[in-house]
Amino acid sequence: MRIYVSVDMEGVTGLVDADDVQPGGRDYERGRAEMAEDVNAAVRGALSAGATDILVNDAHGPMRNLLPEALHPAARLVRGRPKQLGMLEGLTGDHDAVLCVGYHSRAGVPGVLSHSFMGHEIEDMWLDGRPVGEIGLAHATAAALGVPVVALTGDDAACAEMTEWDASVVTVPVKYARDRFAAELRPQAQARAAIETTVAAALTQAPRRPVPGAAEATLAVRWQSASVAATLLGIPGVTAEDSRTVRATGPLPALYRQFGVWMRVASSLTNQPPYC
C-alpha cells in the first residue's frame, strides 16, 4: 500500500500565530518540531495499517520546514521548491491514498491562520462555482488522479471544511479556533494519538478509489491586486470576470499546475506578508 502525505503547517498541533510557522519567527523552530511530530503520528498510523511505501511532501511556505532527521525513518521526503504540483508534488495515480496533515481553512473562514495559498493576496477562489481553498483543490486534484483523500488533520474549521467538501474523509481536530490567531489546544499526546489511530482506521477500511479522468474544471481566483489579474491575462486561456478576478478552464491536475504559475506571477508582482 502506497501512501502520500501532504503536510502543511498552520493546522499543526499547538501552532496559532505567524511567528509559529514563518522562518525567522520567534517560535518557528519549535513549530517545525511540532510539524514533524504530527507527520510522524500519521506515518505510524499508516504503517500499522500495512503501508509499504510512504512519501511525505513538505507543502508549507518555503517547503523546507521538515528536518529530514526529524522524520520517521520509514518515510521519504520531498523538500524544497519550486515544485510543479506544489502541495501535491510527487502524487501519482499509483498511490493508494492521500493524507492531509496540518491543513487550514480557506480565506475568509474564521479558522486558525486561515487563508488560501497566498495570505491575503488571494481573497476568494472557486472551483466550478464552489468556494474552494487548499483543502478542496487538493481533494479535487487527487480525485482526478484516481487517488482518494482519506484523512485530514487541522483545526476544527479545517475539519468542517473537509467534511463539507467530502463527508467520507475522516478528520482529526487538533485545536479549536477561538479566532484567526487563537485556539483552544488539544493536549499534544492526545492529539498525536488521535492522528495515529484515525489514520490507521481510515486506511484499514480500504478506501474507495475515485474514477480518474480528464473532465474539465473551471478555477476562478479573486486577487487583492488588479495588477496581478491584468498580468495573468497574458497567459493563454485565462480570462477576466472583473478587474481583479480571473478564470481558466482545463483538466485537473493540469489546472492545478497552471494555478501554481499564477501564484509565481503574483509573487513577482507583490510583496505582502502572508497573515495581514
Image (cartoon, rainbow, N blue to C red):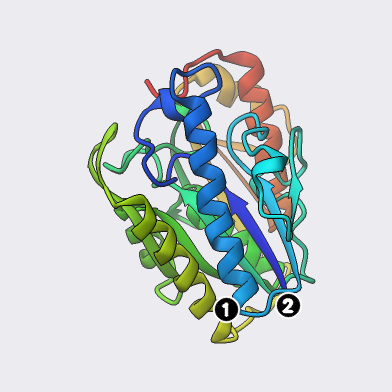
**Type of residue at label 2?**
Met
**Type of residue at label 1?**
Leu
Residue 150 in view here: yes
Would you say the residues marked 2 and 1 are in contact, meaning their CB atoms lie under 8 Å apart? yes
Q: Does residue 257 sit above or below 174 in this rendering?
A: above
- Most extreme residue toward the left is 178
Name the residue: 62% across, 21% down. Answer: 267
Which quarter of the rendered picture does the N terminus lie within? bottom right
Q: Does residue 88 sit above or below 179 in this rendering?
A: below
Name the residue: 57% across, 26% down. Answer: 229
Closer-to-camera residue (173/105): 173
Circle 2 sits in a helix, a strand or a loop, which is it?
A: loop
- Where residue 131 appears, as percent x and y from the top left, is 41, 52
Mark 2 lies on residue? 1
Sooner in the amino-acid sequence: mark 2 or mark 1: 2
Q: Which mark is residue 262?
A: none
Q: Is residue 143 left or right of residue 177?
A: right
Circle 1 sits in a helix, a strand or a loop, which is it?
A: helix
Residue 233 position by quadrant:
top right
Q: Does residue 74 sit above or below 95 in this rendering?
A: above
Name the residue: 64% across, 72% down. Answer: 47
- Total number of numbered labels? 2
Q: Is residue 147 left or right of residue 180?
A: right
Residue 243 in view here: no
Residue 110 position by quadrant:
top left
- Where residue 121 appears, as percent x and y from the top left, is 47, 25
Name the residue: 58% across, 53% down. Answer: 218
Q: Is residue 209 left or right of residue 94?
A: left
- Where residue 141 appears, as percent x and y from the top left, is 64, 60
- Where residue 164 appears, as percent x and y from the top left, is 36, 65
The span from disc 2 to disc 1 (Cα, nearest Å) is 9 Å
Q: Which mark is residue 203?
A: 1
